Amino acid sequence: MHDHKFDPVKAEKLLAPERYQKIKPDILLQKLGVPPGSTILDLGCGNGFFTFPASAAMGENGMVIAADSSGEMLQLLSDRNPRDNVQVLQVEEVAMDVDSASVDGAVLLNLYHELDDRTASLKELKRVLKPNGHLLILDWSPEIEYTSGPPLEHRIPIKMAVEELTRAGYKIDKKERYTEETWLIVAHLM
């Protein structure tokens, strides 16, 4: 990942109540569109902002694969005692130790702009997703620089992300501004 990868020293702010109020993980789960009992890949899970709500929503018959390249962030997640249906996994963005066609839905929250090779990462996600598997990407909009988030030059326009997803074999189901700072894409494998 780029040198602008999230700094684990600032990890606590990822769990701030105002972040939950703004991003609303439960709404994202609805938009992802996978039912309880499904397997979700939370790629770039950090300290578990989305992992814990997803784990509760998937229930005991479901699974959340909490994957991150940072061992430090994964330790912070593990220290929060996730449920039994959470598998914590350290990964590289283009080579994940996840079975092919085993994931119903994958989520990338504020991660897309950090990927070194988005084409290879989308291909790897395609490998682990089941046929017709769903992908949700939420990332920073480059239209206006806010006090939070990465610098403008690191942000990816939604139009570019849509083009990359389409080229990689995904069908776009939804693309929208999600908050004033972020955009959202939901897609599935064609």
Image (cartoon, grey):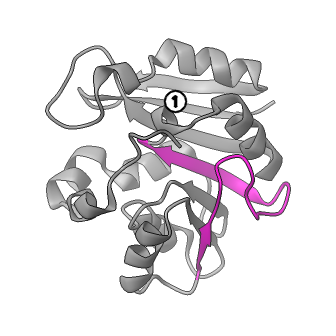
Q: Is residue 167 above or below residue 70?
A: above
Q: Which residue is labeled 1 in the image?
A: 185
Circle 1 Cα neighbour tier, 10 Å, few/some/many (<14 / 14–19 / ≥20): many
Q: Is residue 19 visible?
A: yes
User: Quick one: quadrant of the C terminus?
Assistant: top right
**Residue 176: percent from left, percent from top:** 42, 23
Taking the spot 55% from the left edge, 59% from the top edge, the residue there is 69
Q: Is residue 95 magenta?
A: yes
Asked whether, in this view, residue 135 is left or right of residue 114, the answer is right
Taking the spot 50% from the left edge, 70% from the top edge, the residue there is 71
Q: Amino acid at mark 1?
A: Ile
Asked whether, in this view, residue 181 is left or right of residue 44, the answer is left
**Residue 153: percent from left, percent from top:** 36, 19
Asked whether, in this view, residue 101 is left or right of residue 17, the answer is right
Taking the spot 37% from the left edge, 54% from the top edge, the residue there is 25
What range is drawn magenta here?
85-110
